[in-house]
Image (tube, grey):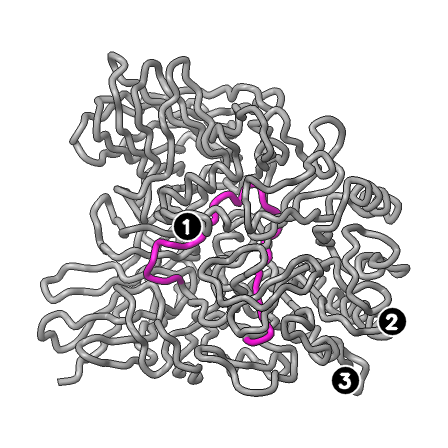
Amino acid sequence: MFRTSRTPRTSETDRGTVPRTPPVPLRPTRRRVLAAGAGAAALLGVAGRARAAAPAAGPTAAGSGPGPGAAPDGLAPYASYWFPDSLPAGVPGPGIVWRSLSRWTPEDDPDLAHNTATVPLAERFTPVPANGTARDGQARIASLVSFAPTAQNPSQGSPTADYYALTHWAYIDELVFWGGSAGEGIVLAPNAPVVDAAHRNGVRVLGNVFLPPVAYGGDLQWTRDLVQRDSLGRFPIAEQLVRVARAYGFDGWFVNAETDGGDSALATRMREFLRALRAAGEPHGLWITWYDAMNSTGRVGWQGALNALNQEFYEDRAGKVADTLFVDFRWTPDTLAASGALADRLGRSRHELWAAVDTESRGWNADVRWDAIVPRTGDHVVSYGFYRPEWTRNHLTDRSPGAFHHADDRFWTGESLDPARPAPEGSWRAPATAVADRSTVAGLPFACSFNTGHGLRWYEDGRVSSDTPWNHLGLQDRLPGRRWVVDTAGTRPSVTLDFADAWRGGSSLLVSGTLTAPVAVGLHAARLPLTRASVVELVHATGAGPVAVEVGVATREPSAPGGPVPYTWLRAGSADAGAGWRSARAALAPLAGRTAYALAVRITAPGGRPVVWRLGALSVHDGARTRRPAPPTAAAVDAAARQDGRAWLRLSWRAAAGAGGRARHHEVHRVLPDGGRRFLGGTCGTALYLPGVPRAGRERAAVFEVRAVDELYAASAPARAVLPWEP
């Protein structure tokens, strides 16, 4: 059973029991859930010129700018959430805006440009798994994640590094933007940074339609609103959901009907609604996942299975109704086996069934009967359905980025932190030991600066250009999917993503420890076509050393899962301690006409000395790069408020088109009176909210520069916008 709340900002469940009403929790738990959600919007080109429709005043404005501050005049854009049609009785709580989806139009949405996802869904391939027990073509993973509260979820990141910066996309098929509550809204569209990061890694993202249990404020009228027909027999909310997904740039909807009290006629109407939603969305590649709650009687009865009572919401006599089914936590080994067998009989893949795995309260200590889902011997029965894996952040006392990523790596890879060499299995069956990873690194140019999408500072060319903590998943790189495969005949050093220094973004790859033998670190699985002009470049630095560096390129895959990768090693120079960041290049002409299937680095320390070595960037491209991307145009301050020597503003611009090519993302800097530049934020879209920008001395105007950044991180010439200060 999923969660709603009696109070506007929290939700709780106990798989069908009615818990007592608790105080508002400080941290989400299985029974006390911070109902989170989001929304997005889309309008290409210049949008958002109008000031935001005045939402209820929030306690804090959040954005990618220089620091927090109370935002005057409701300028801060937030992700979108709605009720299907009718609104609750009474008035919304502080910071909450009640909206009706039936009356939404993209033309009237003032936050469209701030909520637009622009990165297309990348194609994926499956390399030979690094783990001998991982299987291709069988179990996959759906992940239900609450990134922030439903209300006041910032559209474009925020000035804190304390964020669930998911990076293990390689194991995930489907991300559900989980959240919603009876006091805020029950239809949530994913925010743009999450969608952009997921799409860059080939992962589809679903919005959430959450019809809450009556015990937590659910109203059966909202279910009736959802499935209402118009005078022509159409389902207007189904058409609106498709319109939202297309406009905002995400991939479909997770539909969770948990409001009890219906009858078989309402169940029939729900099935017809799903069919209409599918028919309208299928031409656009939209996806539907149905949650095992409402059954064919119209009542809520969680089956823990695909069976005769809920089959019609998944597959009826006319064919497919939903693309996948999320099986409730009540499953048993027998019900999952029967579910898989029924899917087989229906001509559907049994791996389209997500078996719910509750990780919200105990994470990798969860008590799960793994063999019922992904047995070690025999075929996988169904697929994983993780509920709230952001436990890897929420349970920590130290929620620094480094501590979070260490915990998150353990969750996805296992205690060994090496998917090729798993630790003896305890109670946790890490995804990397069962599920084959996938990659989108399949074309040139390719670059990675090991940026996780959050950090304590922002770095450019190895120098700090903003000392403000930040998060924005849209700026995240395509990171190595297998973290970390390390080969050495000696002592294994520590290999991690580190936030104390970086070449670009907020983080770098750090190898530290005593190297008693050469150490090879596997990086990206790839399908990169190589030519005589192809080169590989590294940017690296040594804090303790010296070290000799080689880059590995594999032009064949291993012969079997878990087998050694046949790298060709190319010299990439050496680095001395304290010499700072340095670049190295290796020509790939000897490998022309072949395909790079994997990339790696190998470092050697003479005399087995301790090393602290960082890899700041890796790129593969053809020849010298001389052209910069085309600059954006029409940069403008759309709306602003000034108070006590600070400004809150909305900035927008037009993305370049034509010969300049599509930008990877855009970056915004403040030009200081002395000519220096300070990073304020970035986005894959064409609008950014900047909170609390301070006046520099007695300057007459604040000057902002917007640059397009391409796949190799080359920046365009700037487009400028000016905000005059009041005398």
Residue at 53% x, 19% y: name it.
Answer: 564
- Residue 177: x and y in percent read 56, 60
Residue that badge 3 annotates: 230
The span shown in magenta is: 157-183
From the viewer's perspective, is residue 20 above or below residue 521?
below
Q: Earlier in the sequence, mark 3 or mark 2?
A: 3
Q: Is residue 159 magenta?
A: yes
Q: Amino acid at mark 2?
A: Ser
- Residue 423: x and y in percent read 53, 25
Q: Amino acid at mark 3?
A: Asp
Farthest-out residue, front: 20
Q: Is residue 251 magenta?
A: no
Residue 704 can be seen, yes or no: yes
Q: Residues within 10 Å of mark 2 (few under 14, many from 20)?
A: few
In space, the residues marked 1 and 3 are separated at their CA atoms by: 43 Å
Q: Amino acid at mark 1?
A: Gln
Secondary structure under tag 3 reads loop
- Residue 438: x and y in percent read 57, 39
In space, the residues marked 3 and 2 are separated at their CA atoms by: 20 Å
Looking at the rendered structure, which numbered label has been put on residue 144?
none
In this rendering, which labeled residue sits more in front, label 3 or label 2? Answer: 2
Q: Main secondary structure of the magenta part?
A: loop
Q: Residues within 10 Å of mark 3 (few under 14, many from 20)?
A: few
Residue at 42% x, 67% y: name it.
Answer: 154
Please say if the residues under marks 3 and 2 sit with CB atoms less than 8 Å apart. no
Secondary structure under tag 2 reads helix
Residue at 25% x, 17% y: name it.
Answer: 609
Q: Quadrant of the C terminus?
A: bottom left
Residue 642 in the figure: left or right of residue 397: left
Residue that badge 1 annotates: 476
